[in-house]
Amino acid sequence: MGLKILLAGESWTSLGLHLKGFSIYTTGGYEEGGKPLIEALEKQGHAVTYIPNHLVPSQFPNSVDGLSGYDVIVLSDIGADTFLLHPDTLTKSLRRPNTLKVMAEYVANGGGLLMVGGFMSFSGFGGNACYHNTVFADVLPVTMLGHDDRVECPEGINPAVAGDHAILSGTGRAWPHFLGYQRLIAKPGTETLLKASDDPFLVLGSHGEGRVAAFASDCSPHWGSPEFVGWEHYSRFWSQLASWLAANR
């Protein structure tokens, strides 16, 4: 039976500044990067509810009851402030639920939580994802650096399998290359399944009755190379990871 998965993040708006001689103009655009992951999970029979970054303040559940219909929450390339600085709080100084604490309680009650790497995951680009200053510092199975945690690998880096686990069943030991990842520290009592050089790349753990995982790189470009997104085991891997996370639901 398929899982109900809530995916938040993986979207961005771009602003371009163009100079042509004495003339200047701007362009804008909106893009989403979650399609490969969504399609991979749906291919395996799971139902995915997707909330892009800009809709999180209005659509992401802010109560444990609201999250109870999901087996797994996946956060990918979405900074902590997107959850913490709701417009009512930022512009009107109104009190609102702390959605990160709500997610922590959801996991403690048996839910699954996965954070996927990106410029706005973990500590993030310039430290601006800022999860190290939140309750997620206790929830996630890794210790975050608290500053810019990127390891850019334009030459490509292939994660190495560091342990046997059902999550990796049928995926082989040769992984496609990635173009970067985030430097994390696995907490004591957790399990590291993949490593990039000496750094943990996929770490499993628990929080209360629930299960948590940290994947240190992208599920899609740019760090997630076309070779990874097109990998024959791409769908199997994400599905098996989601199934493990949801085991206590």
Image (cartoon, rainbow, N blue to C red):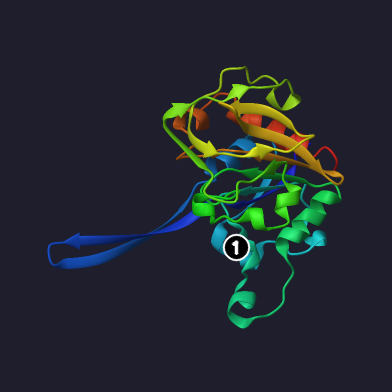
Q: Is residue 158 in sight in this rendering?
A: yes
Q: Is residue 55 above or below residue 143?
A: below
Q: Residue at x 63, y 35 (%)?
A: 43
Q: Is residue 169 above or below residue 108?
A: above
Q: Residue at x 28, y 61 (%)?
A: 17
Q: Is residue 85 above or below residue 68?
A: below
**On the image, numbered disc 1 is attached to which residue?**
81
Identify the element where label 1 is drawn.
helix
Please provide percent x and percent y for residue 57. Answer: 62, 66
Considering every residue shown, the one lying at the far bottom of the view is: 92
- Give residue 24's quadrant in the image: bottom left
Q: Quadrant of the C terminus?
A: top right
Q: Is residue 112 above or below residue 99?
A: above
**43 or 191, which is in the foreground?**
191
Q: Residue at x 74, y 23 (%)?
A: 165
Please provide percent x and percent y for residue 89. Answer: 64, 76
Local packing at callout 1 (Cα closer than 10 Å; few below 14, some 14-19, many 20+) is: some
- Give residue 159's quadrant in the image: top right
**17 or 147, which is in the foreground?**
147
Please provide percent x and percent y for residue 220. Answer: 51, 39
Left or right side of 111 for 155: left
Q: Quadrant of the N terminus?
A: top right
Q: Residue at x 54, y 46 (%)?
A: 34
Left or right side of 70 for 216: left
**8 or 82, which is in the foreground?**
82
**Kind of residue at badge 1:** Asp
